[in-house]
Amino acid sequence: MENLYVNRELSWLKFNERVLEEAENPEVPLCERMNFVSIYQSNLDEFFMVRVGSLQDQMLVNKKIRDNKTNMTSEEQIKAILKEVKRLNKRKDAAYHAVMEKVEEYGIKLIDFTVAKSEEKKFLEQYFNREIVPLSSPTIVGKRQPFPFLKNEDIYAVVVLETRSGKERIGIIPCTNNMVERLIELPGGKGRYILSEDLILHYIGKVFKGYKVKGKSLIRVVRNADIDADALYDEDLDYREFMADLMKERKKLSPVRLDMSREIDESVVEALCRYLDVLPERVFRSEAPLDLSFVYKIQDLLRMNPELFYEKRVPQKSASFRDGESILSQIKEEDKLLSYPYESIRPFLRMLNEAAEDDSVISIKMTLYRLAKQSKVIEALCEAAENGKEVVVLVELRARFDEENNIRWSRMLEKAGCQIIYGLEGYKVHSKLCLITRKGEDGIEYITQIGTGNYNEKTARLYTDLSLMTANDQIGMDAARVFQALTKGETVEESEHLLVAPKCLQSRIIDMINEEIEHRKNGEEAYIGLKLNSLTDKKLIDKLIDASRAGVKIDMIVRGICCLIPGVKGETDNIRIISIVGRFLEHSRIYIFGCGERAKYYISSADFMTRNTVKRVEVAAPIYSQAIRNRVRALFDLMLSDNRKARAAGADGRYTLVKSEGEAINSQEILYQEAYDRIAQRNAGQAAESTEEEK
């Protein structure tokens, strides 16, 4: 059955290739193409820091460990990754230069010294002497000056120096400096710019006087960021302080990749590899700048050209909520669903703020994973605690690359009087769960919110996510059990309505797949629809293969990693898989099991990855409202019909753009337009009612 599986890491690279395709796509506005080139690179950096770093660690522990789907060893996976990345990086370089050529037509040109005019060279030399030399910290590597520590993702200029006696030395200057503008404007107001690291590299010989420059290059190191906090934790330590120290350690982990801007003598590359403990095959030569984050400044320079950007879209008011009325009361009337970024996160924030001030509210409990830098969620929780509510917040300090941010928020919440939980031993808490408990006329009432994405106002404008708000008592009681377990440092053993990982999500999903298999065996129509970020859980993959063999129709929208190959005759030919990569990051998770009235609908924070299904606390919530079920199904079907941004996975493991047949369907743009239309219709209806009343 090996021909039915794709290696996880190679599948992720296929996803990043789809990102790169958007950078190459002439139908995408120019500045957005520039954005996709930068996203490709930042994605790749994180991939090396986390996934390649993890494989590197596996090799040190046990070289015989194999991937459970393709049977590849860690070493084989890394070799395959490096080969594929070198292929993709050539396309990245070409895409970058193609975009920058087009940018020149709008009066912005990034130059190097080969095209600099004499007056520009004079200005740049003066700028170098005045602005850069006083801030530079040059090092010549020798017996008394060891090779310096190179910070993760920072750029350095490296020069090969020859002494008067003919000996070679290596000189290094850091190029990443917050005191120096990265994009230096040349005089004359003609839109000509140069990168500060190119300026440093050109004049580097002036810093190392008395030496002959034999070769030079810009370099950038990407370091391993894979740290197992639970394996290192000592229970005698304060957990928050332990995590803060661990973040400092991460910055010092071993390199997994070395990027270079120029070809230099092979002996020098070998020396750098020795100093950095990097294998020569991990050295990548880049024709594009080593860090593309400066493109956002170029975008700012082009803002007066709206045709270079996507049409401006603003999250709309949800037509499900009435203005000027209690949010909690409206949720009590009927379940509500918010669809980001098409609808604004404000009703959810209003719900929190209202709960913070409502005398009938006893407690607010939440799980927090990633938050905005300026979080209104934190403000509401602090206010609730200061108003005397019981506020229990699980802040996951192990949310990768958000640890420092979450440590800061946990201190602020604690100071306001909230009870803080730092997570569970052995399990990350990735669920998006909020429970408001209040004392109503008939006793205890629950308002429960379950989301597919983080409580982050910034990403709610960039990621597609769903947020369900319900007053269903059974769901509320299940949520209460989740929080009771978390406060005791435990996981939920069983739940009736919510699917809760690690102990009662994967098994329940398998049960529902089996139900569809039985329906098909009985000659009935059977269906499974899944929208996920990633599919890697072999147990679930194999069960989906079983369902396909039984004749169950399966539609899947998997944005990123997908380790299952569809369309293989007699095996997965009842499975269709597409990936949508477009303007917004597809992030919502939807599970559909069954057809017609018997269909079960869930939204969830959990992908079908082993790390989600059995190694994290995750929550999937059932959708009981028929109106919301209809809405979710319509949303799912629209995405399945996308023929502009969808790529279909084939039996050969490749992804190809879905051919446009008939009307062009860009699901993200249509969903945004529908959000505009819904609120316009509601406003028109209200205006008509107001006019009628005046009569």
Image (cartoon, grey):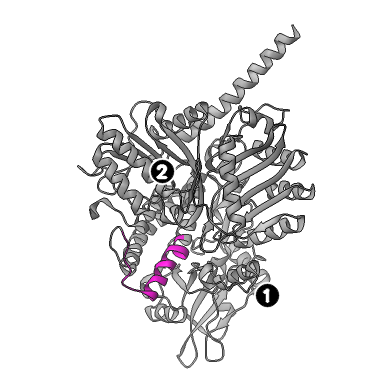
x and y percentages locating residue 586 in the rendered image = 48, 43
Out of 148 and 181, give the one closest to the viewer.
Answer: 148
Q: Residue at x 58, y 48 (%)?
A: 481
* Residue 468 visible (yes or no): no
Out of 565 and 478, give the one closest to the viewer.
Answer: 478
Q: Amino acid at mark 1?
A: Pro
Find the residue positioned furthest to the right. Answer: 387
Instruction: Report which quarter residue 26 is drawn in.
Output: top left
Instruction: Report which quarter residue 575 is drawn in.
Output: top left
Is 677 on the left or on the right of 667, as rendered?
right
- The residue wearing badge 1 is 134
Out of 26 and 517, give the one closest to the viewer.
Answer: 517
Whether residue 545 appears in magenta in the rendering, the answer is no
Which range is magenta?
47-68
Q: Residue at x 70, y 27 (%)?
A: 323
Which comes sooner in the sequence, label 1 or label 2?
2
